[in-house]
Amino acid sequence: MMETKALKTELLCLGARVPGLDKGRKGGAGPAAGGMFLFGGTVANVPTQSWFVSQSPYSVAAENGNYVIMRDGDGDGEQITEVEFPHAKFQALKTEDGIPYYKIALLHGADCLATTTIQTCVYWNTPKRCKFCAIELSLKSGATIAMKKPEQLAEVAIAAKRLDHVTHVTLTTGTTPSPDKGINYLAKTANAIKEATGLPIHVQFEPPKELSMIDVLYDSVDTVGIHVECFDRAVLKELAPSKVEIPFQHYVDAWKRSVGIFGDCQVSSYVIAGVGESDASIIAGSKLLAELGVYPFITPLRPIPGSMLENAKPPSPGRMRYIYEQVAEILHDEGVSWMKNKAGCVRCRACSALSDFE
Ligand code: SF4
């Protein structure tokens, strides 16, 4: 029987075919075009729409009203495990002025309410756009609205907590042209949600020009994500030209200041594997993060349909397993764990299997 952590890694890298089931969404800033799979006590955001999914040995079949993950093999294939798909009741509601709640925020993972507060990015129509990103695609397709008002999000959060037992919130943003990089709007939004629900809140942003700008989040935010994406600066230059313009030391200073404000294990950074970097770069970079008390949220590349990397291939499950094993040991040595984290991607853990290897 395949271990849960190995299966999750396979599904994150290879995706799963879901014939006849409409699971997943297109676009979005985070790893989109996937479906949330709940199995074996974990949750995975599994690609279901990217080009490589048709080649995956994994599929989902319906059986007596339940769903099962299947793996191709001789004959009909092998049943691997039962799987459930979280269903969010709040997403069927509308605001008084007729905006569907699903255009304002979505259920991520098992119990996280997530949204992109500002769905536009200053880099989108420029050569500096991050190649993995699809932030404005979901806007174009009408799946979301450009700017979510704090009071709209508070309203949705109240419903999500009441109807779907959501226990934490993730807020991300496109980068704004202002020096705060969207932090002030995140703070305003987080204040409104906190006041309405008391839920733990995670926000994500680029390091602002003045690091003291982060302090405004102290009152209402519990955890933050400041995403380096890749430690190999030559690779990062190709992948996310805007990010490479920010000196690495500025990231380090932003992480340090944030750990000082929010505490150990409450600061995280996405690290994307499979964009041209070496294993050593991810492992050494993750060690540096862990030593600072920052959680390295390592995800295999997610080639989102419509993004500039839509035709790329995620790294192999074998490579990801190796990286996860090495970094899990480092986390253990440094006393860093997803279990100490209060809100956001690290607590949700659908997009990375690192927590499952800890
Ligand atoms: S890990 Fe983050 S981006 Fe991924 S599903 Fe969870 S909240 Fe969303």
Image: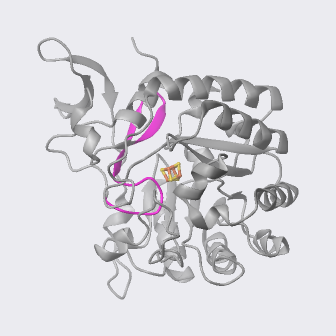
**Residue 138's x, y, as percent?**
35, 69
Location of the C terminus by quadrant is: top right
Hey, which residue is sitting farthest right in the picture?
Answer: 260
**Residue 140's x, y, as percent?**
31, 76
Hey, which residue is sitting farthest front in the picture?
Answer: 234
Q: Quadrant of residue 280?
A: top right
In the image, is residue 91 above or below residue 61?
A: below
Q: Magenta segment: does it hold 27? A: yes
Whether residue 253 sits left or right of residue 122 in the image: it is right
Q: Residue sitting at 72 percent across and 66 percent down?
A: 207
In the image, is residue 128 above or below residue 253?
A: below
Hey, which residue is sitting farthest left in the picture?
Answer: 75
Please state which of residues 2 and 208 is positioned toward the viewer in this rendering: 208
**Residue 330's x, y, as percent?**
75, 28
Q: Quadrant of residue 168?
A: bottom right
Q: Quadrant of residue 208?
A: bottom right
Location of the N terminus by quadrant is: top left
Count how many numbered circles sit on residues in the image.
0
Q: Is residue 203 visible?
A: no
Whether residue 35 sits left or right of residue 120 in the image: it is left
Please state which of residues 323 and 68 is positioned toward the viewer in this rendering: 323
**Residue 99's x, y, as percent?**
34, 81
In the image, is residue 306 above or below residue 41?
A: below
Q: Residue sitting at 50 percent across and 61 percent down?
A: 114
Residues rendered magenta in the picture: 26-45
Q: Residue sitting at 41 percent across and 15 percent down?
A: 2
